[in-house]
Image: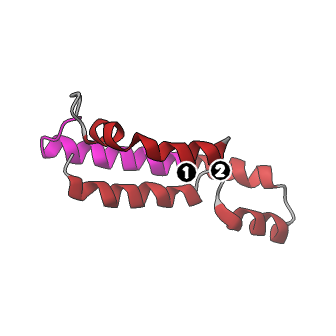
Amino acid sequence: MNRTLLAPIEAVTSTGGALMPPVMGAAAFIMAEYLGIPYISICKAAIFPALLYYFRLFAIIHFYAKKNGLRACHGKNTVFTSVMKKKWIFFIPILSLIF
């Protein structure tokens, strides 16, 4: 995929995190407290719109790629694998934070 498209796609998909239960940001907790209803009921009400958001986003990206003849990169020499071969040492701090 064209590298200039990766940043906007990442921004839009990250924005969807505010819609998707159970994360939904602080807004869900404020709604539960203000309305006096359980948090789980807010999550149940938000799951369908969040899934619809991601399905629509997938469809837009898919049809854009079809229209412009973009394909997935299935080769061994991808950017990810070349970076991982050179910079694998940077995973040690991440793993130490996780474990």
The crowding category of the residue bearing disc 1, from other C-alpha atoms within 10 Å (few below 14, some 14 to 19, many at least 20), is some
Cα distance between the residues tagged 1 and 2: 8 Å
Q: Residue 77 appears in which quarter of the rendering?
A: top left
Residue 7 placement, left or right of 90: left
Cβ atoms at labels 1 and 2 below 8 Å apart: yes
Q: Which SS does the magenta portion mostly show?
A: helix
Tally the numbered discs. Answer: 2
Give how far across and how far down residue 72 sits, in percent: 23, 35
In-front residue for pair 21/83: 83
The residue under the point 78% across, 49% down is: 40
Which corner quadrant holds the C terminus? Answer: top right
Give how far across and how far down residue 17 sits, in percent: 55, 55
The residue under the point 21% across, 28% down is: 75
The boundaries of the magenta stretch are: 49-72
Q: Which disc is residue 50 wearing?
A: 1
Q: Amino acid at mark 1?
A: Ala
Q: Is residue 72 above or below residue 2?
A: above
Give how far across and how far down residue 69 sits, in percent: 12, 41
Mark 1 or mark 2: which comes first in sequence? Answer: 2
Q: Residue 30 appears in which quarter of the rendering?
A: bottom right
Whether residue 52 is in magenta: the answer is yes
Whether residue 76 is in magenta: the answer is no
Q: Amino acid at mark 2?
A: Pro
The residue under the point 37% across, 44% down is: 87
Q: Of helix, strand and loop, which one carries label 2?
A: loop
Q: Which disc is residue 21 wearing?
A: 2
The crowding category of the residue bearing disc 2, from other C-alpha atoms within 10 Å (few below 14, some 14 to 19, many at least 20), is some
